[in-house]
Image: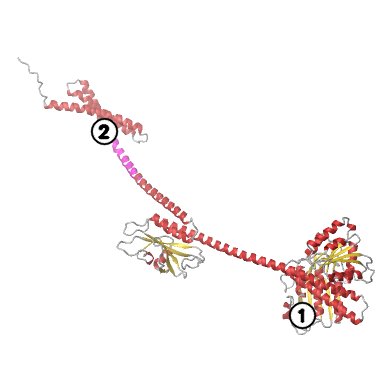
Amino acid sequence: MECNCIEPQWPPDDLLMKYQYISDFFIALAYFSIPLELIYFVKKSSVFPYRWVLVQFGAFIVLCGATHLINLWTFTPHTRTVASVMTIAKVLTALVSCVTALMLVHIIPDLLSVKTRELFLKNKAAELDREMGLIRTQEETGRHVRMLTHEIRSTLDRHTILRTTLIELGRTLSLEECALWMPTRTGLELQLSYTLRQQNPVGYTVPIHHPVINQVFSTNHAVKISPNCPVARLRPAGKYLPGEVVAVRVPLLHLSNFHINDWPELSTKRYALMVLMLPSDSARQWHVHELELVEAVTDQVAVALSHAAILEESMRARNLLMEQNVALDLARREAETAIRARNDFLAVMNHEMRTPMHAIITLSSLLQETELTPEQRLMVETILKSSNLLATLINDVLDLSRLEDGSLQLDLGTFNIYTVFREVLKLIKPIASVKKLHVSLSLAPDLPEYAVGDEKRLMQTILNVVGNAVKFSKEGSITITAFVAKPETLRDSRAPEFLPVPSDNHFYLRVQVKDSGCGVSPQDIPNLFTKFAQNQSTATRNSGGSGLGLAISKRFVNLMEGHIWIESEGLGKGCTAIFIVKLGIPERVNEYKLPYMPKMPTNHGHTAFPGLKVLVMDENGVSRTVTKELLMHLGCDVTTVGSSDECLQLVSHEHKVVFMDINVPGTDSHRITSRIHEKFAKRNERPLIVTLIGNTDKLTKENCMRIGMDGLIVKPVSLDKMKSVLSDLLEHRVLFEGI
């Protein structure tokens, strides 16, 4: 029997079983691989909140895989043990599956809330992205603002600032047009002054009270306006739709002399108008950050314009100040030149006038010593009085000039008040006796004998006031009263600037001079202290005088911190001149060496200074001869020279006094004095050096003392004065007349 080796085909049921077997194997393989992946996930995810659920899933999957794996043995005859294992695996799988299903009922809501939170976080993330976008936009805007500000503030020229603003805004915002409308001089219109695209814009004008302009000026934000608005029609009309237009105001802060075409001079806050236009026929619109950029740039433009205005004003003020300084410097130089010329003129005229006056007074005083008839003696006395009045006038003019330029200063020292008034009385009585006027002096018992002040200025003030009373009185009497002013009587409503301050170190001397003269009308009293002013009444018009006495007296009184005024009830009723001056109280009177006071000579004989060898140096021949005659009349042995070289050659130890008549002590006098000091090393062998000078200022005295002179005498010099001068000079070996 022949054997057939071809295997029979599997029946369909067996084929299905085969497929199930293979499938169970792969299912078991897949089930066993999934727990491994879950274990890896749990290990890597440390924040996953449902680890125990994953464990259940892992157990469920493992059991399912084990069931499918055990099921492989059930396709063939199997033992009861396999059936038991299979049963246990399915029971466990069913149990774990049920527990897992129940757990999912509780887990799903949590999973849904997680989804909600995830959505919330996504929204927050999106919002944060938008905010970051805004921040980046703002940063970009700020960067543009800083860039534009840097460009705008790179110059302080107003026109450059405005032109740069338009160019930079147009470039940054890609504008089609940008324009600036400025207020006109009248302030009633806005004029097109700058544009971005047009080099020379036509000066269009629009009324400043246009509703759109008022709307823009009423807010500090950029405002969108219609492209058809008059201020927005910057480009010719075309077939394209115009772009969006915004306008913003530009503050013009504190403008002054700010002219563009006919810009006004503005002192109050005004506005210009800036118009910005986007490209035509485009869908682009203005964004918020762009409007903020425009507003920020506008503020920076306002600040830059204000700085430019301040700079222009400061430059203008500096130029004006420089011009004023140049003018003031020129005026100062001219004034100094004029003062020097005046001082030089006064110095020369002082010397030139005093030199002939010196000759007249000296010769007249010498003539008085001769035998004269009464008529001749009267003539000589008249010459002397007239000469003294002329000398007083010269002093008044020179003192007034120094008072006005502030160069005159008080020469303070201790002096005898009683002696001052007695000397005034001696000087004024001869003049008053000619007019048959009775002059009386009344000094209060409490008046101090000594005081500290300027003796010469006080005496000159009293002489001026008393002389004024004598001049304007034809008959009657003149009374001079002096006393210490009481504190309650010092204040005077007529002089509010006079503020006396009582103290233990000083007192106020009150002097009253009352006359029975022609009097003064009340309306003329204020003019009496004006220089060259005189009372214009008929009775006094021919009384003579220069009109300087009271003017100088007022200035002297002011220097002595006092006050002077005149009281009169009217014409024909006389008047009273009153002045108050401040004088110091000396601490120890006996220790003060009182200055030289002229002594009245008792003998004019030729033996006053017999044999006293004197050397006289004077460039003026007449003055030299007069001084020689004066000294010879006093018994001196006089030698005269006309130059400094002759003086240095002839001076010897036999000469006791050297008189030098020098115009202005300077290099020549300094040289002569120094050479004489060098020539005579011992002081007791050196002659006394005295200058006869016409200049009476304090600086002259200080210069003479500095260069080593022993004395200074102011011309003119009379016979009595020269005798007193020589006596005091030989006694004290130094003499400087009060200056």
Residue annotated with mark 2 = 98
Closer to the camera, 305 or 650? 650
* Front position among marks 2 and 1: 1
**Does residue 184 show up?**
yes
Residue 316 % position (x, y): 55, 63
- Horizontal placement of 369 versus 331: left or right? right
**Does residue 443 show up?**
no
Callout 2 amino acid: Cys
* Quarter in which the C terminus is drawn: bottom right
Residue 453 % position (x, y): 81, 66
Q: Secondary structure at mark 2?
A: helix
Q: Residue at x 74, y 68 (%)?
A: 343
Residue 255 % position (x, y): 50, 64
Closer to the camera, 35 or 259? 259
- Horizontal placement of 594 versus 225: left or right? right
Give the quarter of the image for residue 568: bottom right
Residue 256 % position (x, y): 52, 65
Q: Residue at x 16, y 26 (%)?
A: 18
Closer to the camera, 510 or 102? 510
Q: Which residues are magenta?
A: 96-120
Residue annotated with mark 1 = 568
Callout 1 amino acid: Ser
Q: Which mark is residue 408?
A: none
Mark closer to the chain start, 2 or 1: 2
